[in-house]
Amino acid sequence: MNLIGKSGIAVRKVRRADPAAVAQLAKFGVATIHEAMGRTGLLAPYLRPIYKGARVCGTAVTALGHPGDNWMLHVAAETLQDGDVVVFAVSAPDDHGFFGELLATSFRARGGLGLIIDAGVRDISELGEMRFPVWSKAVHAKGTIKATIGSVNTPVMCAGALVNPGDVIVGDDDGVVVVPAAKAAEVARASQAREDKEAATRARLKSGELGLDIYDMRGKLEAAGLKYFDELDQVK
Amino acid sequence: MNLIGKSGIAVRKVRRADPAAVAQLAKFGVATIHEAMGRTGLLAPYLRPIYKGARVCGTAVTALGHPGDNWMLHVAAETLQDGDVVVFAVSAPDDHGFFGELLATSFRARGGLGLIIDAGVRDISELGEMRFPVWSKAVHAKGTIKATIGSVNTPVMCAGALVNPGDVIVGDDDGVVVVPAAKAAEVARASQAREDKEAATRARLKSGELGLDIYDMRGKLEAAGLKYFDELDQVK
Amino acid sequence: MNLIGKSGIAVRKVRRADPAAVAQLAKFGVATIHEAMGRTGLLAPYLRPIYKGARVCGTAVTALGHPGDNWMLHVAAETLQDGDVVVFAVSAPDDHGFFGELLATSFRARGGLGLIIDAGVRDISELGEMRFPVWSKAVHAKGTIKATIGSVNTPVMCAGALVNPGDVIVGDDDGVVVVPAAKAAEVARASQAREDKEAATRARLKSGELGLDIYDMRGKLEAAGLKYFDELDQVK
Amino acid sequence: MNLIGKSGIAVRKVRRADPAAVAQLAKFGVATIHEAMGRTGLLAPYLRPIYKGARVCGTAVTALGHPGDNWMLHVAAETLQDGDVVVFAVSAPDDHGFFGELLATSFRARGGLGLIIDAGVRDISELGEMRFPVWSKAVHAKGTIKATIGSVNTPVMCAGALVNPGDVIVGDDDGVVVVPAAKAAEVARASQAREDKEAATRARLKSGELGLDIYDMRGKLEAAGLKYFDELDQVK
Amino acid sequence: MNLIGKSGIAVRKVRRADPAAVAQLAKFGVATIHEAMGRTGLLAPYLRPIYKGARVCGTAVTALGHPGDNWMLHVAAETLQDGDVVVFAVSAPDDHGFFGELLATSFRARGGLGLIIDAGVRDISELGEMRFPVWSKAVHAKGTIKATIGSVNTPVMCAGALVNPGDVIVGDDDGVVVVPAAKAAEVARASQAREDKEAATRARLKSGELGLDIYDMRGKLEAAGLKYFDELDQVK
Amino acid sequence: MNLIGKSGIAVRKVRRADPAAVAQLAKFGVATIHEAMGRTGLLAPYLRPIYKGARVCGTAVTALGHPGDNWMLHVAAETLQDGDVVVFAVSAPDDHGFFGELLATSFRARGGLGLIIDAGVRDISELGEMRFPVWSKAVHAKGTIKATIGSVNTPVMCAGALVNPGDVIVGDDDGVVVVPAAKAAEVARASQAREDKEAATRARLKSGELGLDIYDMRGKLEAAGLKYFDELDQVK
């Protein structure tokens, strides 16, 4: 049954990704992981970290709320375990400040590592001092009410990506990526392979070798029709 | 008489909020003050500080200008007193860099603490080094002219909020809030009460207690129709 | 012949601005240079530096690519000399992450100082650690392909400004400005003149003198119709 | 007392602008009226009519609601009289479809002429067939709830303009303007004067006379420094 | 297996929703159907019809392409049957004109009724004359290439909604809604029930009865704290 | 000398494109012409016609103004000849209503066919009744002043494209394209060739033939790696 966008459901237990795989993924950046997944899994780039150098890797506890209503973040708090990251979606675009340092205190006390929120956040000075990482669509002091129920730990559409409870969430200065729980180990391996390969390339580039040669591009460029000229004035 | 948006008026004296109340308000964050005012008074969240950790609390000297014309900022400078914050509105949306370090030097010399501007600003490196806080809609190097008169110290509509000269302006990383001068003391008291209450809640949340229990939400959630399931698979 | 927007051309040699003039321009901020050019030359303010305090001054190596395709950045790398800044335009609006730390390593190894890109960038944590300055329209982890040819070292329209290969590019926290190669020395002189004049003004402003008096504005304001009132209540 | 943005108040009686003045204003376009008011009173241009040729002139019944909640539109309906236009503001930016043909049927039955809404609308085909004019920020099929109270017939900030109950609202293809009730007759007269003057100018322009001569601009352009050249090649 | 966003797959046969249910759904508007589905299924409101009065109801043939590349629309054409609507998603935000009257001619010849495209379209005059309905994010004359493969008839994320091949797509002036194939009959019944109920309400509203009474809101408003005043001046 | 963005110059005579070539170009749509120019020349798609079916083809008289100042439109009027289209650029982004029916009356009396404006326009009902076509960035009733000089008949950057006085401007429902005067005849021929070719393709598509076969795409798709499956369930 399709539960995306459906309100009224709170699920207590989450089948989280394998902790060993999560620990492996924690070593890689968002760009690397998204590449290792065949360029899938990115949340929309309008989600930005509230401080430079923010970084998180954990398992998703999901919540769906409504504009201006953060009630479900409290329901989500009860289902948190060590190593979780809350992923909060809203049923319609909204920039209220759904989350601040009080809820961050609660999340951290229950094991929560951070928050991904397709809406606004406030108290960002305090959150920065706590080093509680949040990726949000907006910073807005405007407070929310607790009047309408949404859902907790059902699949959500957050910033254009589908997130299932238990999936791995990685965030850094480049943005946020979601790794399906079942693929965590495989993606960690592919990420490592990519990093290994890049290390070799990096050394060659650092020595002044060109990508044109390393990746053998010259013939392809010529085949594609690129014409070289010595001077701009020589073009036709 | 409705003076909002009206050009051609410069008022020399401002009835500023009570200094003791301003000093009280300086202790609180924008989110707290906005809550203490019944969730009113916020300027639009597109106003962002030019550096992290920017903070200001002072009394408003207001100015209204026109697109690409910063003449009125010079007129405003003459009316500044110690502890003032300039609030600058534009008669139509505009992103020019109306303000830079020269004007900041002038404002500071006359007692100005900072600037709220519904337009662009430049020299932000220098302003950051001076620790002169500015909340602006844009950063833009483009300069302005001095050709058309606006007004100074009349009521202005700035970033969607009505600001009267003498009102208290508080800015931090979360944004900007305006407190009517006559309400400054009352809002300071309500802010303190809110902080006191939050301190108690924070301690409970930090110990792992849940908002669900602290705020007695369980019955209300059930009444609202929230259904709990142990596993996602059990939903229908 | 109009080569703006035309694909398929790679030019090897660039007629760069005079190095002495470039070195002079390196002393000034973007706002000052744009003023010294009669308020021309600014790229659109949506280009933002990836870290605070980023700063670059160098000669333009230009590239034109297509949405989601960063092939031409590799072609551009081969034409880099010490002191160059790559200016990358895209044939249609696009936010992919065209550039990361591998390409930055390559650019730096070939003499490149930085990048201006009318699109997205990734690996911004690593680029920040390298202190490799980039001004971009977006931060996005999404990777690109290498399938369609564009051009290198032809005139490009980047963020609303025309950039010719060899022009001087200056970037700082305020944005980016392009100085035509032939005007570099003249603009450097005008920038110095402006700074000298501003130093004198700054000292007067710092002492509390008003712009109203320094710039002799009082008569002009009166002529323009500005009416002074002592109190707001006195306005009609 | 400042009631802008305050929830919980419903006012039954509205002091409407003088009907004769409203009837006079109905003859003029939005641009003319805004000019006649000294270029004030316009609502933000993101409000667009749902069909070409929409036009309304009436007295404001105001309502303030919350994101995704259209309850107050029903409260407002009870206070409608013949010739009223509902002006609906939301406490935070929101694009839900707050209004459709059922509510339009109700408004019309009670005397309502149209709606100005700083949010979304739906059923626009049906509303177009009914010729019920609406100016909105968005078209969106998404429905709203009725859970949180706002206010009715208090002053509201709608699309950046202050609207008091009883003010005159005029909307056409160019947008929406609000005329303070007390100024309705004066603005109607000034609008007529402007139209009379424009009729004379129009005739002269139609005959081929130039604005340069009609408005006597040639000397001013020269004084401002405009230089004429016969050919582009002659410029410097 | 999760195929959303995956390139390289073309599926020939689509399990389309029951034609009788599709025919039933064709009688209802987008707003009604979305309500009948518990307020789910809407595509983002930035998709707008290219002409007023556009309307479509059919079964989805899906395609995924890349920025500036419309190759997959040709692959999709081969799988069209009478009554299909093409739903086109792009792997990254893009506004190119992917579709014009030639492709519309092809689609129509193969049985296609219309297009939903999360990108740009061109030839809109000609498409309007053909009465070939398109809902798009942009109108843009810029043409596309055919260089990179995507997928056809796999699940796609289009304008924020998940669309499976064979689902029912309904579009009108209010936007676009997707009905899962398996739920088409049920949603059609619920839509009819809603319309029946609305017809009765409409008649009462038309006679001047108020929603306050029809929906029995007066007690709830009082319980929620709404205070009535006769005059605005009486408010505290 | 680079005159783009430079104020203070008014050029009386324009070297217009050959009238025969302009007449040829008038037969083609914007999309066709842009294709015939190698996909160059389009102005940004945010320029939209003020009424459906608007269409213009003429020679450019250019003007550069400043935010909120339409003075140069009057200077431009004097240089109009039969068959001209005014192209108006602004020195910084701005949405004021620079143009209305009075100026349209003047332009038409002097031979002007239409207006392309990278800013706002007003009186759109009246302009629609006059069938005076305008492509603008915004519709806004807000009026402008006449205080600062710009330029007339110098090269301008309008909506991201370079327009020289005398170039051919074509506008339709798809947007606006500029054809360099010297290329007008060549582009008209290439447009005709494209239309002839499309006519043949259209007939084949109308008969049900597929683009896949007409353009011989099947082998290329296979080479690019597209895999066909009969059913979605068969995909791995």
Image: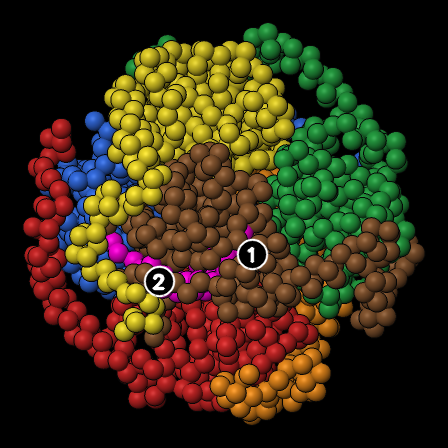
Chain colours: A brown, B yellow, C green, D blue, E red, F orange
Count residues near mark 2 (Cα–Cα under 10 Å), then give few for <14, some for 14-19, many for 20+.
Answer: some
Which chain is home to disc 1? A
- Reading the chain from its start, which is encountered first: label 1 or label 2? 2
In this view, the residue in front, C168 or A135, is A135
Q: Nearer the viewer, residue F165 or D15?
A: D15
Going by the image, does E121 lie left or right of D2? right
SS class of the residue under badge 1?
helix
Q: How busy is the neighbourhood of tag 1: few (under 14 within 10 Å), some, or many (20 plus)?
A: some
D100 with respect to E103 (left or right): left
Q: Which residue is mark 2?
A: A13
Q: In 3D space, how far apart are the residues under numbered discs 1 and 2 (Cα atoms)? A: 21 Å
Q: Which residue is mark 1?
A: A23
User: Residue C59's x, y, as percent?
Assistant: 82, 42
Q: Quadrant of the N terminus of chain A?
A: bottom left
Which residues fall within the magenta stretch?
A148-171
Picture residue at 9% right of the left edge, 60% below the top? E214
* Type of amino acid at the residue the image marks with label 2: Lys
Residue D168: image location, x then y, percent: 25, 41
